Amino acid sequence: MSSTTTRRDFLKRTGVLVVGFSLGLHSRADAAVFETGAAPAANQLDSWLAINADGTITVYSGKVELGTGVSTALRQIVAEELDAPFEKIAWVQGDSDRTVDQGSTVGSQTIKRGGAQLRMAAATARAALLELAAPKLGAAPGSLEVASGVVRVHGDPSRHISFAELLGGKRFERTVNRAAVPKATTAYTIVGKPVHRVELPAKMTGRHTYVQDVKVDGMLHARVVRPASIGAKLLSVDDSALGAIPGARVIRKADFLAVVAPREYDAIRAAAAIKPAWSESATLPPMDELKQTLMSIPSTERGVASDGTSGAGRVAKRLAATYKWPFQMHASIGPSCGVADVRNGKATVWSSTQGSHTLKSAIAHLLGMQPDDVHVIWIEGSGCYGHNGSDDAAADAAVISREVGAPVRVQWSRADEHGWEPKGAAMVMQVAAGIDASGKIADWDYQVWTPTHSSRPGAQPGGEANFIAARLMGMVPSSRGSLGGERNAAHTYSVPAMKVRAHLLERAPLRTSSLRGLGSPQNTFANESFMDELAQLAGVDPIEFRLRHLSDPRAVAAINAVARLAKWTPRVSGSSRAPSNGVARGRGMAFVRYEGTEAYVAAIVDVEVDQAQHRVRVTHAYVAHDCGLIVNPDGLKNQIEGNVIQAASRALNEAVQFDRSRVTSLDWRGYPILRFADAPDAVDVVLIDHPELPSVGAGEASTSPIPAAIANAIFDATGVRLRDVPLRV
Amino acid sequence: MPSSTIRITVNGAAHDIDAAPDTPLLYVLRDDLGLTGPKFGCGLGQCGACMVHIDGAAVHSCRTPLSAAARGPITTIEGLGTPEKPHPVQQAFIDEQAAQCGYCMNGMIMSAAALLAKTKSPTRQQIRSTLNGNLCRCGTHMRIVRAVERAASLGASQSGGSDE
């Protein structure tokens, strides 16, 4: 097959049948852009959107829907800027051949950065449509207006022409004007509205296509068989039992082991029927020595903040504390799945990856192919909350497909996902501070010990070694430095002398990568628990104590807003009423400005603590949230509510269990997440909108203050200060 | 186990399935009948993503062998309603925007629909207790409970599109 094969030929040849796939099949105004196999150029307007002959508009988004509602919010941004009907916008996302590489969908950057790119593309397109319409309507561009996909003469609406009549099916042939002037936010009609999410009717009726639902003609089903323990070597495989299973066979590449069969249940049976022999060794530390282990792994010290001179002379009281956070899981409800068709020097991969363009290069390097011979098609997966097993499953499928010469679907088991997904990092945080006679913080010293929060496959050669499949085939990932552990290590309070250091560990007992918030929930747990401890030491209400150290009006506004919402009564923490019927009640608060530069989140939670039953439940949570301009207030509330519940689960329930050789949390009993019985009675959210300010990320921010707010509430209820997550009474 | 032909009724239509009798119903629905609404979540009956109705009761299709699935009519989420004409429970979930990734929705909706078919006006406690075996990781619990309450108030137990 020649390298000029078009994408359409490719689809024809591979006979793709994606069941129920309802969007994104509009033909693009010009197919030539597909023929290179390279991503469309970001500076070309045609790379971003197309006006179709039927009056629909196809938008090509490099950012993808991970369950957070961005595909609806981004549509709102485009519809607003283009003055096009929202419902006429079709959406193509995360296709390495058809969408611009906007970077992976990570870090709460989709609205902030991805939305800004789409806004400029739409503003350029709107200006182009006005230019095209002017001669046809016999009017100057300045006398034209746009409404609902129609250009018309201001004051004479009978003179009009639709987008489709102007350009339907043809290309813009111009570059994105980076200086295009976007619409004034005061003129917004759809941005800021609680538009219903576009894909939910399909999701609620079983018609939405997830990557787990992709079918390709001739597809074989595969299951991976992971090592019995971390680092185990495959000595031999007894596959004598496979004769009884139709079409089943073993795929082995060094320590990479898998089975394939034409029928899915046969693949499952085959995985159970083979008898691999592994050489095992104890590579993990004892779980109860995790803190000492983390603090003794070789590390690089990074100064995060160092402000002011020592305030030691003015210190009246001192306090120090150590906080611990365990390894945690993404714990996606759907185990990861990948589908790949690798034949004749070309590869097509269907994946719920967060980064189609990166995955394309990494798969190419894994297979020894050229990146432009790999086509990654993103299909939504189960919510991932960061780097879960999606990329690894795609690599598994690619390796197996190449071996068998047929399309292959790899569905991880629950134990595969729990055991082998990259884990959220365990961390140790130490804080020491002094307060002066007036009850203000005089100095602050903070240290965190953290593994990296990013081990994604990389687009550069060598970056493929981060795939599990690559490691099992003998590749060794090169160190790419440490990322994310210092996120929110430095708080944003005014302190005369502050020193913040991060000890970036060279390795970790378990493979770690990004889980919602990276190091921010851990650092905020320590910082905001300690703020309450200092408030206690000063004998001051926790909110009053925080406000003493804040001058940023948006921070103050958020804290005051949540205090009003929760009807907070100022008092020294721990003065809550006596337990009734063995259940103690308390409330706690916490605040963060995410990453120090992003959304402001202030939270209050009420808890009930049943010490006899060792049970803590968040009964009511309150959040005040300021992320600048709000695109979709209901989508934002949904995200915040979800973060509150997920963070409560992480704070109260979750720690990955392991023995000396392997992860032992292999199902939902071994890694229990919050259930309905433990859900709050209510989560109340107040949104602080700033249409005059750009949007900043809201995907992760409201996760961060919740664990500390819960710990502070438990102290308020019981007088017991818990510094280890999961918080156990 | 050698395969044999087993007749099951799914969403009102009879199908003769040629598969090993111990094949979990989930794979028959998804792979043989193209009904991918029921999801694989754990294969252990622990998360509820795979739920279908058999004889009106919500069951884990990942733990129901094909041989046992023939005992009564099966309804999947596709059989409850369509995007154009959703079942009242589905409509209530849409109205409340009660999902994020939506992977668990199949189980939530099938579980809730089975509850409401029997209990017209469940208490909030009954709803939480019924859904306690259904896991959601995005944290849409508050909206899901509201959606079930809304469905109850819409009279989900009486409206069309229910089992058979």
Image (tube, coloured by chain):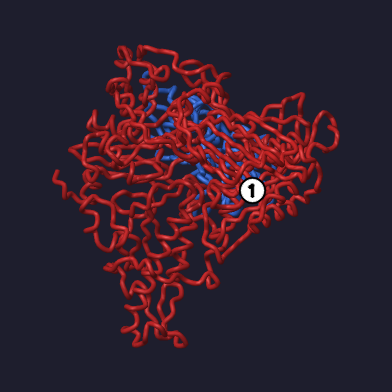
Which quadrant would residue A439 be assigned to in this image?
top right
In the rendered image of the structure, the colour used to display chain B is blue
Residue for point 43% across, 56% down: A114
Q: Locate residue A417, reporting x and y percent.
A: 45, 29
Residue A269: % across, % down: 39, 21
Return the residue nearer the eye: A626 or B15.
A626
Q: Nearer the viewer, residue A408 or A353?
A: A353
Q: Amino acid at mark 1?
A: Tyr
Farthest residue, direction front: A313
Residue occupying image coordinates x 33% and y 54% = A99
Which quadrant: the C terminus of chain A? Answer: top right
Nearer to me, A406 or A656? A656
Q: Is residue A201 left or right of residue A224?
A: right
Q: Is residue A16 above or below residue A555?
A: above
What residue is disc 1 on?
Answer: A493
**Res B8 seen here:** no
Q: Which chain wears red?
A: A
x and y, in percent, of residue A323 in the image: 62, 31
Q: What's the chain of the residue with tag 1?
A: A
Q: Residues within 10 Å of mark 1 (few under 14, many from 20)?
A: some
Q: Position of residue A197 (x, y in %)?
A: 52, 55
All told, the count of numbered labels is 1
Q: Which element carries disc 1, helix, strand or loop? A: loop
Q: Is residue B75 visible?
A: yes
The quadrant of the rendering that contains the N terminus of chain A is top left
Q: Furthest residue to the left?
A: A2
The residue sitting at 46% across, 54% down in the picture is A71
